[in-house]
Amino acid sequence: MAVTHPRTDTTRPESDARFRPRGTLRRAATMLSPAAAVANKAALERDAGDRVERLITAATDRIHQRRHPTRPRMRALIASGGARLAWQDIPVPQDPGPDGAMVRPIAVATCDLDRALALGATPFPLSLSIGHECAAEVLTVGERVTTVAPGQRVCVPFQINCGRCLPCRAGLTSNCAEVPPLSMYGFGMGGGHWGGALADQLAVPYADAMLVPLPDGVDPVAAASVSDTICDGYRHIAPHLPGLLRRDPDADVLLIGCLGRRTIYSPSVTLYAGQLALALGARRVRLADGRPEVRAAAERLGLEPLRPRDLRHATPAPLVVAATVSSRGVWTALSLTAPDGVCSSVGGLHRTARIPAIGMYTHNASFHVGRTNARALMPGVLDLMAAGRFHPERVISTHGALDDAPRLLARHYRSSDIKTVLSAA
Ligand SMILES: [Zn+2]
Ligand SMILES: [Zn+2]
């Protein structure tokens, strides 16, 4: 399945870019920022030796394969500084062993973080093999794999997890104890060198634990984001809404997006959360966002769009999703959480935030912040899709061919495009 491609398909964002790549100095400043220090500390707080070993193994393997190639080669899309994207010819990943599988991504989606990642606005160092949301076809499986077989179509979680350790068995798959913290596809060195989904092949080290077969009738294009952003939307709704609806059938959901007019982050998690809230029985879901295109998308999905200024007179909701990257947004979300309600935060993109603690205390409000346990949540969203109750494909704004990835992704990164999905012919 190794395909060799020339290194000619390089695309640079056009000069009228709405979002521009960060230059070397600003990129370096981002990588040395206080937020980066916190992220680096978390990445190394456990199994730092394993992490360093993976880094050294990846570097020596690269040099060795260049001098004495033993493995076939494949194409992989590499994002480099200056938001350059190019197919590169690299060795196929190393054999993942008896518990692993080799898969071929057939539908790959952008994550809400990808624009910032590719433009150099995150602490993750470039260059990297980009892409961490995909549906794939199984190519080969190791001798101990029993739940998937070659030819089968599967969803691939973006986080690496073993399925056997204590956190994995408890469904806390984002903190698998068998791999270094923050082990994930598509984040290069920062994610632990696991490869990216925009490649001909991806190695899955724990196939039985990680891969979930795509249910019959579910389109891989619709399911590409199940790897990450769809489950990220689901985790804000599914654990909380059913209980709130039992208490009050009119319990509504308030989604707080970007309170300014522009942010580098895409809004798909927020839109999926809104769709899932309706699918799980909420009669009313409001989404406040300063971006007109996001309000228009929300309206098309049956959500009630609000301008940020409308929040001044908004009624509190028992379930509030804080999909905001500003400290003010977190404060607003917590202030609009009704008594005995829950506020669930999409990201820790702000290093610190003020919280209205006394108000939360008197209201018995809960605040959830953390990362999604993607693998544990995947079956729940796939069941909803198979039953026709949830249609994540309605969030896709651009769909094109995988071969056209450099051009379509360059367009996604420089514009306010919401979700690009690329699929194999
Ligand atoms: Zn992601
Ligand atoms: Zn584990």
Image (cartoon, rainbow, N blue to C red):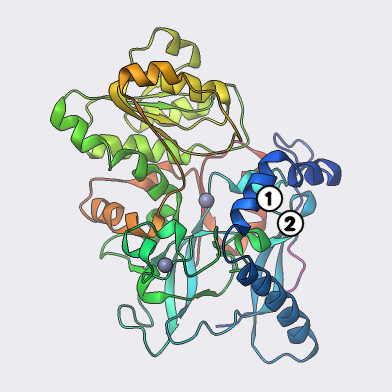
- Disc 1: which residue: 118
Regarding residue 346, the answer to whether it shows in the image is: yes
Mark 2–mark 1 Cα distance, whole angstroms, equals 8 Å
Left or right of 271, for residue 13: right
Q: Earlier in the sequence, mark 2 or mark 1?
A: 1
Left or right of 259, for residue 315: left
Residue bounds of the magenta highlight: 5-9
| Residue 32 % position (x, y) | 77, 45
Mark 2 or 1: in front is 2
Say which of 187 and 352 sits in front. Answer: 352
Q: Is residue 191 above or below residue 364?
A: below
The reply to whether the C-beta atoms of the residues labelled 2 and 1 are less than 8 Å apart is yes
Left or right of 67, for residue 223: left
- Disc 2: which residue: 126
| Residue 330 % position (x, y) | 50, 25
Label 2 element class? loop
Q: Does the magenta run of residues contain 284? A: no
Magenta span dominant secondary structure: loop
Say which of 337 and 398 sits in front. Answer: 337
Say which of 310 and 421 sits in front. Answer: 310
Q: Residue at x 78, y 42 (%)?
A: 22
- Decide: few, some or many residues near mark 2? Use Cα within 10 Å; few <14, some 14-19, many ≥20: many
Q: Is residue 129 above or below residue 19?
A: below
Label 1 element class? helix
Say which of 271 and 42 sits in front. Answer: 42
| Residue 127 % position (x, y) | 74, 60
- Three-letter code, disc 1: Ala
Q: Residue at x 45, y 63 (%)?
A: 176
Q: Is residue 358 above or below residue 348?
A: above
Image quarter for residue 287? top left
